[in-house]
Amino acid sequence: MKQLFIAGLGEILFDVLADSEEIGGAPVNFAYHANKLGADGAAISTLGNDERGRRASSELMNRELCLSGVSIDREHETGYVEARLDEQGVATYFFPDDIAWDHLQLNDAAMGFATQVNAVCFGTLAQRSEISRKAIRTFLDAAPQALKVYDMNLRQNFYSKEIIAESLELADVLKLNDDEIAVVAPMFGLEGSERDMLITLHDEFDLKCSVLTRGSKGSLIIGENGEVEHPGIEVKKIADTIGAGDSFTASVAIGLLLGHSLSEISEHANRLAAHVCSCKGAMPAIPAEFKLIK
């Protein structure tokens, strides 16, 4: 089977927990999980020329991610975020301003990827700066053949209706969670049930696939020829929920590229996300049974 090349475009950062620092950032988490599912995963981002930047490069190379599309900014520090977990392991994030991924640079390798990628995932957070927003648009414009996956990923106050609407216009696939759809509902005049609201977004922005994750309550996926709900998979002991949504997004993207049914996509994505919730950190080891591309 032909190998798939899949990129995560945006922030790389460290999740600073009470007792550790874990490498993460939604786009690179997505690329990591795509890699573990059998694709060639690549990160496109910018790190600082500092200890965290060197540690990020080392850790991501150890996880077998392609980093040639990651540039180095010598004036700004590598991104980090304070991640505070509640009793259910759900994280709340607090981001510093003006760090390396706010100055996203597309090096020659990154631009070379644009004509090669089968899918690219981008979010809202990295678009908080005009520099990074323009870089993301530049890459997406240069990749007309790619499946463009918009993981809404709303954090703090780093979003606006304008950025969300522009991102939806660029996207083929939307992924958001139940908290996020409640935030965007008044922005876009969405009414009715979560299903009604997701269908409205799906139709208004002419999307190929729209995904709503509901934490322990599963998911709703709407495709071009139907929809499927999943009740979720019980996790006996949640370590944390960091990276679970990103693994879900990677599973959906690869499933769509491989032509799997929505039911197959839904089942695999929910099982994978449940496994990630049972592990610490956004990029845990992934058992071979989850591999989609053998």
Image (cartoon, rainbow, N blue to C red):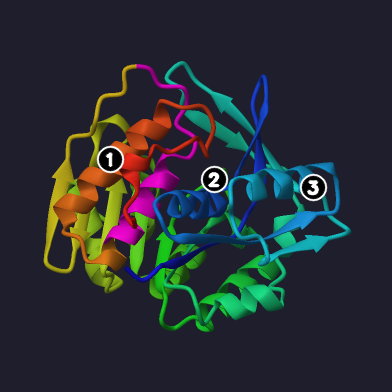
Q: Label 2, label 3: how many angstroms apart (C-alpha)?
A: 26 Å
Contact between marks 1 and 3 (CB within 8 A): the answer is no
Labels 2 and 3: the sequence-earlier one: 3
Image side of residue 290 versus residue 16, left or right:
left
The amino acid at mark 3 is Arg
Residue 257 lies in quadrant: bottom left
Q: Which residue is labeled 1 in the image?
A: 270
Main SS of the magenta part reads helix
Mark in the foreground, 2 or 3: 3
Is residue 287 toward the left or the right of residue 224 in the image?
right
Give how far apart the Cα atoms at labels 1 and 2 are.
23 Å
Residue 289 numbered mark, or none = none
Q: Position of residue 15 (x, y in %)?
A: 63, 36
Q: CA distance from mark 1 to mark 3?
A: 33 Å
Q: Nearer the viewer, mark 1 or mark 3?
A: 3
Q: Nearer the viewer, residue 124 or 261?
A: 261
134 lies left or right of 292: right
Image vertical order of residue 110 relative to residue 246, above or below:
below
In this picture, which residue range is highlighted in magenta? 237-255
Residue located beneath label 2 in the image: 155
- The amino acid type of the residue labelled 1 equals Asn
Quadrant containing the N terminus is bottom left
Tag 1 and tag 2, C-beta contact below 8 Å: no
Say which label, 1 or 3, has the lower sequence index: 3
Q: Secondary structure at mark 2?
A: loop
Any magenta on residue 258? no
Q: Could you say which disc has been placed on residue 54 in the image?
A: 3
